[in-house]
Image (cartoon, grey):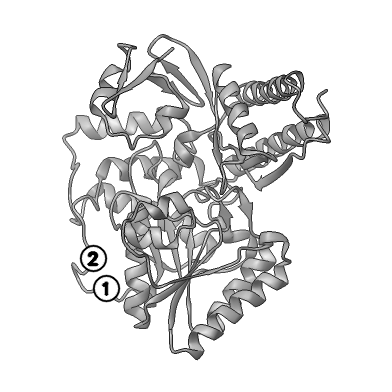
């Protein structure tokens, strides 16, 4: 166990395994506080700490590791690339690895879906993609204001942060975050789909009436950090129609929900819409390597050469891993059939927890392999994830108050690992509720 103390506002650790982190790494680190181990190895949906303890991974690098840790075919391709002295850093130069990625993405993803998108490599992270898309939308329309939604999360740099709802994250900006209007997400605060669409239309019309032109609407089809909130296909079609009728660009942030996480490659496919701009990152890098894409309809590619740039736009190892992922997992429907089956198992297990404890107030939310157990109390969600961690399951929390236990295992998780993780979660819930009952809490419904 790590013992942490504070002396003169400097965090120190009495555990030699973690002492240097406490001594030298910034206080800003977060995930390591929820998962206090020093990891040494990972494979598939399992991680091992340096002492050999195994953990089932329902976190997947916050949605980055859709294909699991150290996928063998991607790893072999990377080793071969390194052994050949092939290009690693290349800015936006043409390289063999970039060409192969673009050809594979065109052949395997765009053409079968009838999509005609140009691809921009804005930098290595999701927030780089958001920033580039905002600049592009404003350049195209000549307008400043963009619309985001309640409980949205789009990143931590200033433009992306302006779209993000989380108050703590916004407070860290240290400056005003202007030129953003916030509309209610689908069925937010008990409203109907029709009511939230009417509110969006009214917001845009009011902005136009006061001469405040809106450049774009930015939306997540499934809000991850916001609490696993799922937009209905009807609502997404309504948002797209409202945007089109007013000459406003529609940007879908698929950074966490894309690359198969919700059951289709793009999360918007179920709605039958074609966004003007789509943002990808996280899992597009295949094996956990940084890569981000801005997909824009061809007529929207109005950039001047070099108008938006960055040193790490062309990370060739990420191109190699991404191309291998597309070749191995997206040339047929096998992965999506697996996701459908695994999602059904996850949903059934979560509904079983709800049914076993009917008076607690749990509810299930999500789509595909992006699901969550909503708890009536954030403290309860924290105790559940802490108890699960102590028993070998890595799962994080999300939502406005971290009240949702978030389950995002690798899409390729084995049935054995999935069931192991779900069993640990079920036991953690029971243990927490039993402890609450024994402590004289008001929790009822313990099986």
343 up-or-down from 193: above or below: above
Label 1, on which residue? 303
CB within 8 Å, label 1 to label 2: yes
Give how far apart the Cα atoms at labels 1 and 2 are: 8 Å
Residue 291 % position (x, y): 33, 48
**Quarter where residue 428 is shown:** top right
Which residue is farthest top?
51
Residue at image position (35%, 20%) is: 5
Q: Secondary structure at mark 2?
A: loop
* Earlier sequence position, callout 1 versus callout 2: 1
Front residue of 328 and 167 = 167
Residue 400 % position (x, y): 56, 49
Which disc number belongs to residue 308?
2
**Quarter where residue 222 is shown:** bottom right
270 up-or-down from 140: above or below: above
Specify whether 352 is left or right of 281: right
Residue 413 % position (x, y): 57, 29
How many residues crowd mark 1 within 10 Å: few (<14), some (14–19), many (20+)?
Answer: few
């Amino acid at each position: 166990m790590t013992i942490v103390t504070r002396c003169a506002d400097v965090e120190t650790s009495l555990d030699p395994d973690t002492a240097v982190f406490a001594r030298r790494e910034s206080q800003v680190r977060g995930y390591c506080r929820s998962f206090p181990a020093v990891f040494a190895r990972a494979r598939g949906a399992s991680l091992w700490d340096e002492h050999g303890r195994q953990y089932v991974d329902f976190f997947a690098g916050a949605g980055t590791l859709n294909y699991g840790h150290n996928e063998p075919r991607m790893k072999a391709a990377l080793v071969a690339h390194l052994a050949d002295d092939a290009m690693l850093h290349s800015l936006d130069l043409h390289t063999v690895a970039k060409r192969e990625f673009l050809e594979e993405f065109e052949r395997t993803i765009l053409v079968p879906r009838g999509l005609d998108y140009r691809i921009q490599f804005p930098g290595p992270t999701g927030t780089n993609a958001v920033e580039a898309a905002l600049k592009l939308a404003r350049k195209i329309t000549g307008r400043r204001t963009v619309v985001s939604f309640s409980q949205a999360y789009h990143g931590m740099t200033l433009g992306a942060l302006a779209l993000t709802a989380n108050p703590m994250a916004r407070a860290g900006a240290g400056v005003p975050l202007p030129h953003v209007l916030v509309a209610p997400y689908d069925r937010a605060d008990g409203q109907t789909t029709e009511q939230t669409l009417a509110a969006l239309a009214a917001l845009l019309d009011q902005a136009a009436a006061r001469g405040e032109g809106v450049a774009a609407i930015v939306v997540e089809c499934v809000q991850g950090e916001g609490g696993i909130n799922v937009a209905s296909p009807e609502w997404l079609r309504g948002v797209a129609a409202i945007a089109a009728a007013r000459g406003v660009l529609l940007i879908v942030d698929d950074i966490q929900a894309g690359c198969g996480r919700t059951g289709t490659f793009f999360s918007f496919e179920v709605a039958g819409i074609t966004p003007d701009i789509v943002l990808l990152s996280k899992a597009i890098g295949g094996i956990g390597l940084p890569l981000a894409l801005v997909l824009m309809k061809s007529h929207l590619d109005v950039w001047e050469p070099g108008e938006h740039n960055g040193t790490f736009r062309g990370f060739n190892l990420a191109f190699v891993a991404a191309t291998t992922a597309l070749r191995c997992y997206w040339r047929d429907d096998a992965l999506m059939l697996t996701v459908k089956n695994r999602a059904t198992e996850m949903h059934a297990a979560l509904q079983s927890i709800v049914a076993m404890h009917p008076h607690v107030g749990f509810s299930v939310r999500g789509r595909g392999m992006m699901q969550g157990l909503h708890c009536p109390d954030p403290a309860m969600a924290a105790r559940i994830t802490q108890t699960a961690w102590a028993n070998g399951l890595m799962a994080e929390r999300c939502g406005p108050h971290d009240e949702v236990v978030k389950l995002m295992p690798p899409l390729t998780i084995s049935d054995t690992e999935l069931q192991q993780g779900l069993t640990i979660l079920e036991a953690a819930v029971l243990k927490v509720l039993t402890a609450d009952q024994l402590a004289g809490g008001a929790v009822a419904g313990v099986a």
